[in-house]
Image: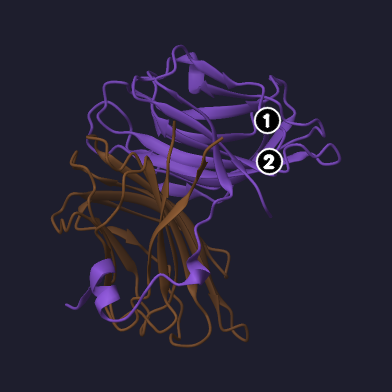
Chain colours: A brown, B purple
């Protein structure tokens, strides 16, 4: 059996607002694993091929430490916005995690992405959020670049964002 | 807005360190593209890995309803599965806080039930310690689809859940079926991977 799940690229984007992967290889699916924080509390935007138009749709659910279960969605927004994947205060030892799966990213179809995320911070007064979502980029072009950006502030020191490729068949 | 690309990262002195060694613990077992009918079976699964992962991409013909791809183990169609699967369903505009039930399958991924839709759903299902005959089998899964405005399917559903199969038997086959018995759409891809390591 052939091994797969290869590291394509690893970024350490501290001090910047966005991380761009533009060498994606020739795989069937991509997986992006983010272990990061930002200099201020923020959400994170996912975009493809530099498209900032209103071509993104998403649906997500999340639960906080206070046991509230919430949802969010956007119909034709400017990004797939991963809401609530932040920790506050920022800049400490607490980091957020997001895993994003992009199946069939080279196929000429409307693109679907799935993600899950979470953070836990400040144990003395717990703040936490965990969630999952699905998003869509309404474009049939092959994905040739992926951008993950903060909605406010820079990525903090210690941030790592890794891109993996998975083959099928 | 400052941007950091993989190329510019290298120009800033960042590099691929040894701590980011490739994860070579994933192995391709089998992939089926455009399966026919409403069910597909991965049989004779090698018993040489620690865990399994299904990666699912597709839709089916349950027009105009939402649909899903459901997973059964070793051909067991009885109510020997339990699931907890919090989900967001755009039809009702509010999330379910969770859903726990006995079912005839142990994991699922939502996808569009409209073969004519141009949209797709996807997700993944992990099955832990599938060869261990001392444990009931545990699965975690997540996935969904967005269908806003496609004119045929509903607006979208997404879930992240856990299921178990209340049997200690080793997993030797996995049956993937569509919701309601409709056929897989052309272009659907079902892939099975073996995982070695913790």
Judge the density around disc 2: few (<14), some (14-19), many (≥20) Cα neighbours within 10 Å.
some
- Mark 1 belongs to which subunit? B
**Label 1 environment density (alpha carbons within 10 Å; few <14, some 14–19, many ≥20):** few
Residue A43 horizontal/vertical position (percent): 34, 70
Q: Residue shown at 50%/70% (left/top)?
A: B18
Numbered label attached to residue B46: 1
Q: Quadrant of residue A77?
A: bottom left
Q: With A34 as the anchor, is A121 left or right in this view?
A: right
Camera sees residue A151: no
Q: Which residue is mark 2?
A: B49
**From the image, which quarter does the N terminus of chain A lie in?**
top right
Residue A42 point in image, percent of width and height: 35, 75
Q: Are marks 1 and 2 in contact (CB under 8 Å)?
A: yes
Classify residue B71 by image quadrant. Answer: top right
Looking at the rendering, in which quadrant would you find the C terminus of chain A? top left
Chain letter behind tag 2: B
Q: In whole angstroms, how far apart are the C-alphas of marks 1 and 2?
A: 7 Å
Q: Are marks 1 and 2 on the same chain?
A: yes
Q: Is residue A155 above or below residue B127?
A: below
């Amino acid at each position: 059996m052939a091994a797969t799940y290869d590291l394509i690229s690893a970024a350490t984007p501290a001090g910047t607002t966005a991380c761009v992967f533009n060498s994606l290889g020739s795989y069937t699916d991509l997986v992006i694993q983010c272990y990061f924080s930002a200099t201020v509390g923020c959400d994170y935007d996912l975009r493809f091929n530099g498209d900032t138009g209103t071509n993104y749709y998403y649906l997500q659910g999340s639960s906080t430490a206070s046991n509230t279960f919430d949802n969010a969605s956007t119909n034709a927004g400017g990004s797939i916005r991963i809401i609530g994947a932040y920790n506050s205060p920022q800049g400490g030892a607490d980091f957020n995690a997001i895993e994003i799966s992009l199946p069939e990213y080279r196929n000429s179809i409307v693109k679907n992405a799935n993600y899950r995320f979470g953070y836990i911070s400040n144990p003395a007064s717990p703040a936490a959020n965990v969630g999952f979502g699905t998003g869509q980029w309404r474009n049939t072009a092959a994905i040739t670049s992926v951008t993950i950006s903060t909605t406010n502030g820079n990525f903090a020191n210690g941030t790592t964002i890794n891109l993996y490729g998975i083959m099928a068949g | 807005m400052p941007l950091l690309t993989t190329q510019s990262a290298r120009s800033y002195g960042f590099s691929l360190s040894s701590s980011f060694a490739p994860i070579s613990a994933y192995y391709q077992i089998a992939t089926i593209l455009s399966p026919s009918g409403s069910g597909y079976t991965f049989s004779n699964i090698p018993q040489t890995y620690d865990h399994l992962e299904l990666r699912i991409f597709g839709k089916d013909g349950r027009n105009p309803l939402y649909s899903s791809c459901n997973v059964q183990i070793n051909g067991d169609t009885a109510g020997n599965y339990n699931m907890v699967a919090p989900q967001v369903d755009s039809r009702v505009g509010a999330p379910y806080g969770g859903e726990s039930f006995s079912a005839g399958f142990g994991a699922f991924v939502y996808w569009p039930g409209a073969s004519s839709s141009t949209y797709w759903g996807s997700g993944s299902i992990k099955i832990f310690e599938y060869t261990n005959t001392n444990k009931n089998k545990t699965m975690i899964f997540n996935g969904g689809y967005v269908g806003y405005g496609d004119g045929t399917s509903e607006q979208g559903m997404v879930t992240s859940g856990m299921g178990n199969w209340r049997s200690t038997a080793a997993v030797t086959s996995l049956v993937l079926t569509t919701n309601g018995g409709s056929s897989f759409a052309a272009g659907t891809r079902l892939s099975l991977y073996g995982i070695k390591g913790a």
